[in-house]
Image (spheres, helix red, strand yellow):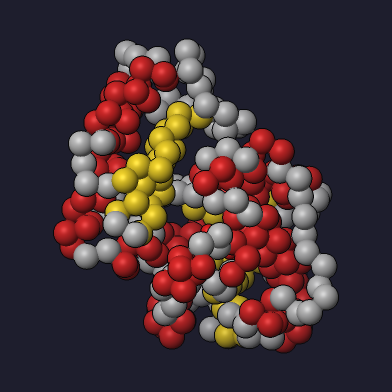
Amino acid sequence: MKVYSKITDLQEQISALKSGGKTIGFIPTMGALHQGHISLVQSAMDHCDVTVVSIFVNPTQFNNPDDLLKYPRTLEADVRLLETINCDIVFAPSVEEMYPENSLGYQVDLGKLGTLMEGKFRPGHFDGVVNVVGRLFDIVKPHKAFFGLKDFQQVAVIRYMTQFLKLPVEIIACPTQRESSGLAMSSRNMRLSEAQKTDALHIYRSLILAKKLAENHDPKETKKAVVNYFQQGNLQLEYFEIVDPNTLESLSDKWVKGSTACIVAYCDEVRLIDNMELIG
Ligand code: PAF
């Protein structure tokens, strides 16, 4: 496995591989890798000849400086883990390498997609995501890129951005990986104690409840009952929305195919995100 920190070195290697007819699969990450990331790497290996993983904690997508400071950074362990599963290339640039002075950013008007849910509670977050993913796509020029559905809105934003900028990359969304308890795998789980992990299960239980209620209630009633149930646990709810999977607009009276419940809650100071499709 090759590890690069400089864009030009990485590009030289990727150009050589592409001229040899190899297809490139890419997984952008912020490190602190877990089984969720590994499943993305495995999907990339199934679909493409060469797998590239980037590890870069992107400062421009954190609206909360404390969250950026506390984001887990485990580069050495991440590289060792990727080596054990035969990943081909790791790209781990510095902030200066990714954002040289006077560099132009990628900007996309996301419309409503950028103002709902995460867009509302983390102003500027998706501008940072679009900018860094645009840059990474430009550097790696992958044929396919793999993203986890745990960040449901992020996948929608990246699909939109790719179409808007007409980028020649196929976006592949992969299912959320869960602990056997049901807790969605996340780098942020590293910041949870065992007791907090037990508390955090309330998120999964609420999503399961939403799925059950969806069988004989409308979205508005389902949301009301789930929010009520959620408030009986130890977490602090930021939002719970039941949305149309294409527009991400909240549903009220009618279900649509793919209706999805999206939730964000704080377990003490750790912000956790999850979602579940309610109507298949
Ligand atoms: O999902 C993430 O880890 C990040 O938002 C991403 C896509 C790597 C961009 O920094």
**Which residue: 52% across, 40% down?**
117
Count of numbered circles on the image? 0
Looking at the image, residue 144 sits to the left or right of residue 189; the answer is: right
Q: Please provide percent x and percent y for residue 225.
A: 29, 23
Q: Please provide percent x and percent y for residue 16.
A: 76, 80
Say above or below: 118 vs 10.
above
The answer to which of 235 and 49 lies nearer the viewer is: 235
Residue 16 seen in the current view: no
Query: Residue 113: which quarter of the image?
Result: top right
Q: Please provide percent x and percent y for residue 3.
A: 57, 85
Looking at the image, residue 185 sits to the left or right of residue 171; the answer is: left
Looking at the image, residue 104 sits to the left or right of residue 197; the answer is: right
Query: Residue 129: which quarter of the image?
Result: bottom right
**Which residue: 72% across, 75% down?**
99
Say above or below: 61 vs 239.
below
Say above or below: 58 vs 46.
below
The answer to which of 103 and 16 lies nearer the viewer is: 103
Say above or below: 17 vs 27.
below
Q: Please provide percent x and percent y for residue 246.
A: 60, 31
Residue 242 seen in the current view: yes
Looking at the image, residue 121 sits to the left or right of residue 235; the answer is: right
**Which residue: 30% across, 54% down?**
267
